[in-house]
Amino acid sequence: MSESTSTKPRSLAEIFNASGSHFDEVTPYVWGPAGAATVKALNLRPGDHVLDACAGSGASALPAAVAVAPSGQVLAVDLAADLLALGKAAAERQALRNIEFRTGDVTKMRFDRRFDAVCCAYGVFFLPSMDSDVTTLLRAVRPGGRFAFTVWHDDALYDFTKAFLEAVTARSDGPGAFGGSADGQPHPITRIDTEAKISAWASSLGAVDVTTTVERIRVPRSDDFGWALVLGSGLRGHLLDLDAGHIADVRDRFLALLTERGISEIKCDSLIVSGRTQDSGDSD
Ligand SMILES: C[S@@+](CC[C@H](N)C(=O)[O-])C[C@H]1O[C@@H](n2cnc3c(N)ncnc32)[C@H](O)[C@@H]1O
């Protein structure tokens, strides 16, 4: 999500660690259903080894571990140790012993094609060099292995995010929801927000048998969910430097804007692009 109104750059680890329990308030509505759909797109089999990049609190890592049990393994990597701790607790509650939760920057890790599959839900657009970092993720998978990446579809969250940024800046002429990245370039998210764009993008990175599906995710608008989605997502970054009184003002302004604009459901539609990495029989 846009970082354009932040007063100073904040690390993603700081933002997502701060999202804490609010992150999992969003899980039953958005991260959970999307994570399950992401794993379904991977067509996992028992015994598979899976890398979940940007795993958060385990929305896709947990169902992946169920799908590959008992002999398969999942490695769930995220910058935010606090979110991984939530995932670890959930794995313990479900008696899943085949997931490792590892804190770190997935773009700095080398995996040498040792996985059968890689997934990344709502994470690729946070990677600093999206194309080369995703190419590196694909190289974590054996030739002919599977991948699935999940991102926001089209104008999902657009009205929601726009209202939030207006509430933060107290201005209505600010940047659009995904107005730009810190360097003034269009946000990478806008390069992969339709079926055609994301399919072409995945193919351009060398993927084959590429398929994209739209996952319709609509959540009835309520004050509780609306604010949980702010606090439990990258939007949280815009609040890190504000005191409690200022945050309360932003919340009131934001929720009033959603009401004024007649936003009765939050559009969280998502795209899941999946396919295979090339094997030796595929031509370049
Ligand atoms: C919107 S959350 C999605 C989490 C999870 N995949 C889900 O769908 O619930 C994005 C996550 O990406 C993580 N992230 C962003 N850049 C990362 C990186 N370079 N390495 C590891 N994790 C990263 C953030 O810490 C955050 O937890």
Image (cartoon, grey):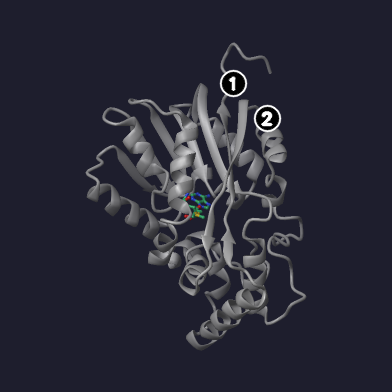
Amino acid of disc 1 = Gln
Q: List the residue tagged with mark 2.
A: 203
Whole-percent x, y for residue 11 in the image = 53, 62
Is residue 119 positioned above or below 90 on the image?
above
Is residue 228 positioned above or below 257 on the image?
above
The local crowd at label 2, few if under 14, some if 14 to 19, many if 20 or more residues have their Cα within 10 Å, is some
Q: Residue at x 53, y 82 (%)?
A: 247
Quadrant position of residue 208: top right
Amino acid of disc 2 = Ser
Dot 1 lies on which element? loop
Whole-percent x, y for residue 251 in the image = 54, 79
Whole-percent x, y for residue 31 in the image = 46, 52
Whole-percent x, y for residue 2 in the image = 65, 62
Q: Is residue 124 left or right of residue 184?
A: left
Which mark is on residue 230? none
Q: Residue at x 62, y 66 (%)?
A: 160
Q: Is residue 55 visible in the rendered structure shown here?
A: no
Q: Residue at x 39, y 43 (%)?
A: 61
Location of the C terminus by quadrant is top right
Q: List the residue tagged with mark 1.
A: 278
Is residue 28 positioned above or below 246 on the image?
above
